[in-house]
Image: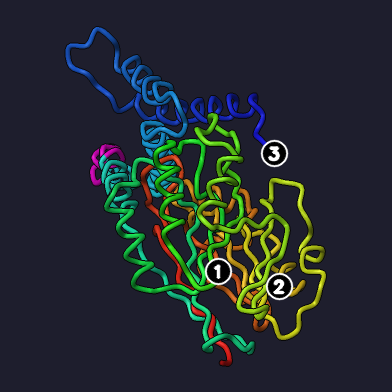
Amino acid sequence: MNYSKTAVKTLPFLGKCLIFTVLCWNFVYRISVPCSPLTDAENGILTALILAFFPGRVTSFSFLASAELAVLFLIYDLFYGLARLTGIQTVFLTITLDGGIVPLVCALHLLYGVISAKRIAVTLYKIPTDYALPGGRLRILQISDLHPGRLQTPLRMKRFYAVVEKYRPDMIVLTGDIFDEFTRMSKFKEYCRFFAETKSMYGTWYVFGNHDAQWHWRRPAHTREDILRSFAEAGVRILEDECAFAADGRIRIAGRKDAMEDRMTPEQLLAEAMPGILTVVLCHEPVELTACAEAGADVIFAGHTHGGQIFPLGRLMKYAAKAHEMNGGMREILPGRYAVVSRGTGTWGYPVRTEGKSEIVIADIEGEP
């Protein structure tokens, strides 16, 4: 399922109009250019127009900076309104440099986000289970929402190899958006080579995300067929509403199609009861987690949310949409049944992370030997 071309064009334009309105409201009263032939109001309107409509793509860094500036000014205006109600507006304006603190905070926040996005943490979870497992433990390494782009430097690739070498996972799971519409073909081939060279006892398993092979903002350099062929050559097993087994049948791996596609319900996918067998479910979006647990999933791995990625925009989207049951981390969904939601190994669109952390997840499922 693809977004309509009308929505792709209309929604960004409406967003830019909203940004312009907020910035214009603030700049008209705050921008003064000495020796300018224009009035202060005209300078403010012109500056707001440039910042709101100059960025061509909503996925560009310049658009993010304008949007973040507008959100921070909106928050500032709310506090200024409270200051006026309490009669301390003069003190408030002095402390905040008559609003000049807003672009300064915005610049520092984005600088922090660029630095933060380059770091990849390793997040460790321990998940108890009563099932008998080979050696008493199943170590799963999860990579999700990689979105190869400008951040994917050779140093980052070395980090991936080092983590695999250090933790030596029994299984690797890829929970979608490993690629997206901005992935260059050179990066696509580089990561396919990485997955081919990265081996584990029970293999590498993958489910499609909503960006891997779909057109949203532009046509990808690769196709769905490229993923199917390259992953087959790399030994990566793709699951689309199907189940497979590992560890001599002691582990069942179920992979769901993305939530944007027509797919099986959890009950249909896990219809066959498997007593005594650990069931691991892979999905991209953290939805229907309770339904999966009720259907028989012992551990569910998902991604998609990026942990918000951009604060406060990600937080606003989280509460506005309320589409995801988890934003990141590990949670016991039902007694003895858990969900792990990755905050993303990379970042989508913007090489910035001001909320959450880029992470590789290591989940140790500990049972009986």
Magenta region, residue range: 94-103
Amino acid type, residue under disc 2 in the picture: Ala
Query: How far apart are the two marked residues, 3 and 2, measured between alpha carbons?
Result: 26 Å
Q: Is residue 229 left or right of residue 105?
A: right
Which residue is label 3 attached to?
Answer: 1
Q: Which callout, 2 or 1, points at the residue further toward the start of the chain?
A: 2
Q: Nearer the viewer, residue 44 or 206?
A: 206
Rendered residue at 47%/31% (across/down) = 58
Work out whether 186 lies above or below 311: above
Image coordinates of residue 113 in percent, x first then y, are 33, 49
Q: Nearer the viewer, residue 87 or 57?
A: 57
Secondary element at tag 1: strand
Which residue is label 2 attached to?
Answer: 293
Which residue is label 1 attached to?
Answer: 340
Rendered residue at 37%/25% (across/down) = 51
Residues at marks 2 and 1 touching, judged by CB atoms closer than 8 Å: no
Q: Is residue 197 left or right of residue 254?
A: left
Query: How far apart are the two marked residues, 2 and 1, measured between alpha carbons?
Result: 12 Å
Amino acid type, residue under disc 3 in the picture: Met
Secondary element at tag 2: helix
Residue 351 lies in quadrant: top left
Q: Is residue 311 visible?
A: no
